[in-house]
Image (tube, rainbow, N blue to C red):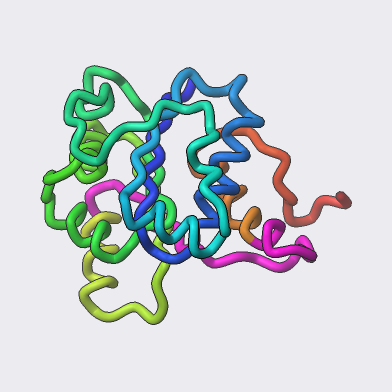
Amino acid sequence: MNKIIVSITGASGAIYAKCLLDSLMQLQDQLEAVGVVMSDNAKIVWETELGNTDYIKYPFNFYQKNDFNAPFASGSAQYNTMIVVPCSMGMLGRIASGVSDDLSTRAADVILKERRKLILVARETPYNLIHIKNMETVTLAGGIICPATPSFYSKPATIEEVAMTVVHRILDLAQIKNPSFRWGSTK
């Protein structure tokens, strides 16, 4: 069973976080635990981009950004995957530098040191050289950079379907079975 950490930063792209949380709700039979850390800026961006505060309605365990008593602040809790969605370049930089000054960066540090799966859904364009070097550093440390770059071969018709092309990739990377469009399939 998967134990997942979801960190939601204040980068644009709240729809990716929403679609991921929606998917995790539907796939709970594959999950033992889901812990969520959401920054204050993430709440503002969610409300601005999605026009609601529905993030409070999810049945997952939410933790404050400075709650170092959260189980996943230690490797002994054995959370196996962390997804930062959307991942701001500030968060990426702090993770790449080994700064553990809040729960999200501490959890990322724990995931990397325990050689578990860290998935950063980068949401920025264009990238500058600092961003690229930070991505390289995280990749060399064992993390996965999964840019929030949708695909279109499944012919998505709504913004949610477009966002889901990224979320399905995230779920695949997290080794969570999901009903994603598969290249070469007839569906």
Residue 104, compared with residue 85, is above or below; it is: above
In this rendering, does residue 112 appear at all? no
The quarter of the displayed image where residue 83 is located: top left
Q: Nearer the viewer, residue 102 or 119?
A: 102
| Magenta span dominant secondary structure | loop
Is 146 situated above or below 110? below
Q: Position of residue 17 (x, y in %)?
A: 50, 50
| Horizontal arrangement in the rendering, residue 160 relative to residue 169 (left or right) | right
52 lies left or right of 36: right
**Is 96 a magenta residue?**
no
Write down the region rendered in magenta: 140-162
**Residue 142 in sight here:** yes
Direction right: furthest residue: 186
Q: Position of residue 41 (x, y in %)?
A: 33, 57
Q: Residue at x 36, y 44 (%)?
A: 38
Residue 80 picture quarter:
top left
Q: Is residue 154 left or right of residue 168?
A: right
Question: What is the x, y in percent for residue 129?
Answer: 24, 79
- Residue 145 vertical placement versus 57 (above, below): below
- Left or right: residue 54 versus residue 36 is right
Residue at coordinates 57% horizontally, 34% vertically from top-left? 24
Residue 153 in picture, x, y percent from top left:
74, 66
Whether residue 180 is situated above or below residue 87 in the rendered picture: above
Q: How many tags in the picture?
A: 0
The residue at 34%/39% (across/down) is: 37
Residue at figure coordinates x 24%, y 41% from the top left: 65
Residue 147 located within the stretch drawn in magenta: yes
